[in-house]
Image (cartoon, helix red, strand yellow):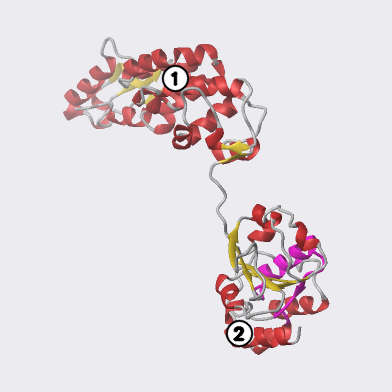
Amino acid sequence: MVYDRELRQKMNTKRELGKIWRAAVLGEAYSFSYVLKPPVKLADSAGRIHEVAAWAAFWKQEGAYWTLLTANKQAGVLGKQHDFPVKAEFCNAETALRYLGEWRRFQNLQERCVKIMTDFPGLRSLCAAYREAILKEDRLPESIWQLAKYFSDTYRTDCYLRELDVPYVDTKFMEAHSRLVAAIFYALHPEMEGRSFKDLCGQLHWQEKAPTPNIYLRSLDKNKTIGGLQELMVTAEQLARLQVNFGRVFFTENKINGYVFPEVEDGLIIFGAGNGVIAQEVEIPWLKEPRQIWYWGDMDRDGLCILSRVREKYPQVCSFLMNPELAEKYQHFMTADTGSSMEMPANLTCQEQACWKFLTCQPPQRNRLEQEKIPLSEVRSFLQEL
C-alpha cells in the first residue's frame, strides 16, 4: 500500500513545487509539514493492528528524506502506543527535491545556469521559474545570458522589434519567448514598473509589427483625387502626412456608409476605423486648416463622446444626422446602448446635448440609434442643404 500518496500530491502542486525549486536555487530556507493519519482510527484498530503497524513502520523507515515527529497515543484496548508517528517534516529544499525525485534535474539546472547565475545573480529566481523550458531547450541558457548582457548594457529603444541586434538571439526567438524576455528585463531593472512583454514594448517604444492601414479615404468629387487615387487606405501616421486639398471633409464610423456616401463637390470622406482616427494620439495638421469638417456617428453615448473628443482637437467640427428629431423619427429602429459613458461629455452643442438627453430618457432596451439604421435618403437630404 502507498502510504505517502497524498503527501506527494500536496508537494507536487505547481505552487508548492515552485516554492521548493526557488528555495533550492536561491539557497533559501524551506520547510513543509504533513500531519499523518493512520489507515484506521486507533480506537477501532483492535482487529486491524497489523495494518496500523505496517503504516507506522513505513513512516519510521531508516533513510527516509523526512524528519518524523512522534508522540504517545492511546489506542483503546491496545493501550498506550509509544513513539507513534504524528507528523512528517521536510526541513530544507534539498531533502524535498530528493524525496520527489527532482534532485538530478536540479543538478542539471545548476549546471546549465551556472554562467547566468554567476554573472547575473538577479536572474536566479528566473532560472527556477523557467526551469522546465531551460531543461528542455538546450540553447535556452545561452540565449538568456545573451539577453541579460544586452539588457545590462545599452539597449535600443524607439524601433521595430526586428531591428534589435542581440548576439546569437534572433527576433523570432524573442517573439516566441516574449514572457521570458520581459521577465529578464524587469529582473535586471526592478526600478521600472512592468511585467508583460506588452509593458516592455510600451516602455521601450518597440513595435512588434508594422502598422496596418485601417483608415479609408474616398474622394466624393469625381474631379478630385488623393494623390491621383479616388480611394486610399492609410495608417493614422500616414493620414497626418497627406497633402489634402478638399474643402469639405466628412467622418463616419461605419465602413459601408463610407462606400455608399453620395457624391459631394469638393468632398472627402474618412471612414472604417471606428473611433481609431481620434483615439490615436496623432495630430492631423491639415484638419486644422480652414475647411468644413463634418462628423456622423451613432446616436448613443459612445458616439456623442467620440464627437466631443473630435471637437477637442478640431473645434470647427460639426455633426450631422445626430439630433433628437431624427432619433425620435426612427425610434422604432433603436436598440440597447451598451456604452460605458454615463456623464454627458463637454464640447457638445445645444442640439447635441438635447440628443443626449433624449436618448438617456428612453427605455434601456431602446436608447441607441445606429447610423446604419438611418436611410440614405436622410443623408441625401442633408447634403442638398449644404
Q: Is residue 235 visible?
A: yes
Q: Which residues, given as a range, are shown in magenta?
A: 297-323
On residue 156, the disc is none
Please state which of residues 343 and 264 is positioned toward the viewer in this rendering: 264
**Relative to 17, residue 341 above or below:** below
Q: Mark 2: which secondary structure?
A: helix
Q: Position of residue 238 (x, y in %)?
A: 65, 54
Please state which of residues 376 and 326 is positioned toward the viewer in this rendering: 376
| Kind of residue at disc 2 | Leu
Mark 1 vs 2, N-terminal side: 1
Please state which of residues 249 and 153 is positioned toward the viewer in this rendering: 249
Relative placement, left or right, of 337 versus 245 is left
Residue at x 28% of width, y 31% of height: 41
Q: Are marks 1 and 2 in contact (CB under 8 Å)?
A: no
**Relative to 293, residue 288 above or below:** above
Q: Quadrant of the N terminus?
A: top left
Relative placement, left or right, of 138 versus 184 is left
Question: Does the magenta run of residues contain 201?
Answer: no
Q: Position of residue 109 (x, y in %)?
A: 39, 18
Q: Position of residue 308 (x, y in %)?
A: 76, 66
How far separated are the C-alphas under marks 1 and 2?
63 Å
Q: Which residue is mark 1?
A: 142
Q: Mark 1: which secondary structure?
A: helix
Quarter of the figure with residue 111: top left
Q: Position of residue 126 (x, y in %)?
A: 50, 24
